[in-house]
Image (spheres, grey):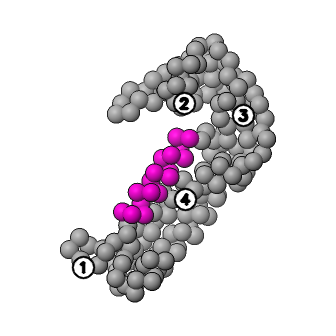
Amino acid sequence: MVILSSKGLIKLVAKASSAYRSVFIGLVIPCMVLMFTSLSEFNLLQHQPFWLPFLGISLLLGLILFLIQSKKEKLKTRLLSAVCIALVYGAGSTLQLNCTFDHSAGEEYSATVMGRKISKGKNDTYYLVLSPWGPEKTETEVAVSRIRYEYSLEKSVLKIRLKKGLLDIPWFYIE
């Protein structure tokens, strides 16, 4: 809306030396936060059902962003900026829509902690290796918070809630 109502004074992407203002960074950073937050917060049981809603949301947003940009801008710039924002937003919003607005009761399962692992790096990531549970027929490695990791000892039993998902993308969380 800002780009359309600015009568060309505000652009999605503008050169640093340009007199015009750009909103690209102001859009892409919140979209990245949405995506990374969603990826760390939700565990999908299957990834295949994710792709259709993700592509639909991304295509719709990408088309809108592409069309609101001035035709005077380079085609490559218009296309890359629209695709970049649309894909990042599409991933985060698909996960948020599916999981946050899923009010299904879900099914409860139990899984035993078979192992624990820490991936060291700039930010440590904590994993629990869970025994087969519900529809999972093999051991599953799940990223968890540091607190969950510290309180989940090997051979302890955890409750897992499997939910349908608003967009029919099954997901689960450890209770």
Report the residue that reaches farthest toward the left: 17
Q: Position of residue 34 (x, y in %)?
A: 50, 52
Residue 7 falls left or right of residue 91: left
Alpha-carbon distance for marks 4 and 1?
A: 31 Å
Picture quadrant where residue 43 is located:
top right
Instruction: Decide: few, some or many residues near mark 2? Use Cα within 10 Å; few <14, some 14-19, many ≥20.
Output: some
Q: Earlier in the sequence, mark 3 or mark 4?
A: 4
Measuring 45% from the left and 82% from the top, which residue is drawn there?
4
Front label number (4 vs 1)? 1
Q: Position of residue 17 (x, y in %)?
A: 20, 74
Confirm whether the magenta stretch covers residue 169.
Answer: no
Alpha-carbon distance for marks 3 and 1?
A: 53 Å
* Circle 1 SS class: loop
* Circle 2 SS class: strand
Instruction: Decide: few, some or many residues near mark 4? Use Cα within 10 Å; few <14, some 14-19, many ≥20.
Output: many
Magenta span covers which residues?
Answer: 25-41
Which residue corresponds to mark 3? 161
Residues at discs 3 and 1 in contact (Cβ within 8 Å): no
Front label number (4 vs 2)? 2
Measuring 52% from the left and 30% from the top, which residue is drawn there?
145
Q: Amino acid at mark 1?
A: Ala
Query: Is residue 19 among the parts visible in the rendering?
Result: yes
Front position in the image: 93 or 7: 7
Rendered image: mark on residue 19: 1
